Amino acid sequence: MSGTPNGIDQYLQLVAKVDAFVARVTARHGDHMRCGSGCHDCCHVRFSVTGVEAEVIREAVATLPAAVRARLAAHARTDDPHRCAALEDDGSCAIYAARPLVCRSHGVPIRQRPPQGAATLDACFRNFTERGPAAVEADCVLDQTTLSTLLYAIDSAHAAQTGSTVGARFAVAELVDQEPASGPT
């Protein structure tokens, strides 16, 4: 369909909205947030991403210098369950510009609504330590159910456009484990 945004375009629009949301929370409550360059507490886990996120990450990794891709491949092959394969030794993220939504939204107050049970509100253990995340304004709370629903809809449209499997998940470690010879040096 001409004029219809593709899955990647829709995903990038969602990324921009999440980034703007995080910027708003940081502007209002930055003095209660410890997230920033050098902190990588949330990067000590292996996780998976949706197909649309995987495509963006693959494209970003392909543009990295060969030495960086080789380092990432080595990280990916360690099977360390306590380290994201994109986490560099200095604590930075090698794919920061292409990081998935889970990474972009970490640290802000997040409301989760399980299918059964009461909604919970949480944030990084380093943030909002004095008053708790419940003390922030309602427009500074990210609703995880809404974000996940939007991402699923975008990923489903992307899967339909690309002929891939709806709901497929991709390990970040596999995405960064690319042969260094395929991109710039």
Image (cartoon, grey):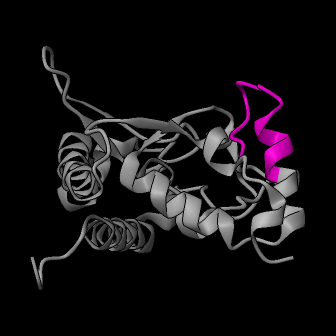
Q: Quadrant of the C terminus?
A: bottom right
- Could you say which is closer to the camera, residue 37 or residue 157? 157
Number of numbered markers? 0
- Could you say which is closer to the camera, residue 86 or residue 170? 170
Q: Is residue 121 left or right of residue 173?
A: left
> Residue 17 colored magenta?
no
Q: Main secondary structure of the magenta part?
A: loop
* Residue 31 visible, this orientation: no
> Residue 82 colored magenta?
yes
Q: Is residue 32 above or below residue 77?
A: below
> Residue, x 79% and y 51% (percent of image)?
72
Residue 49 in percent (x, y) is at 45, 42
- Could you say which is closer to the camera, residue 138 or residue 87? 87
* Residue 127 visible, this orientation: yes
Residue 54 in percent (x, y) is at 48, 52
Q: Which residues are magenta?
A: 72-85
- Could you say which is closer to the camera, residue 165 or residue 10? 165
Q: Is residue 167 left or right of residue 67?
A: left
> Residue, x 11% and y 83% (percent of image)?
2
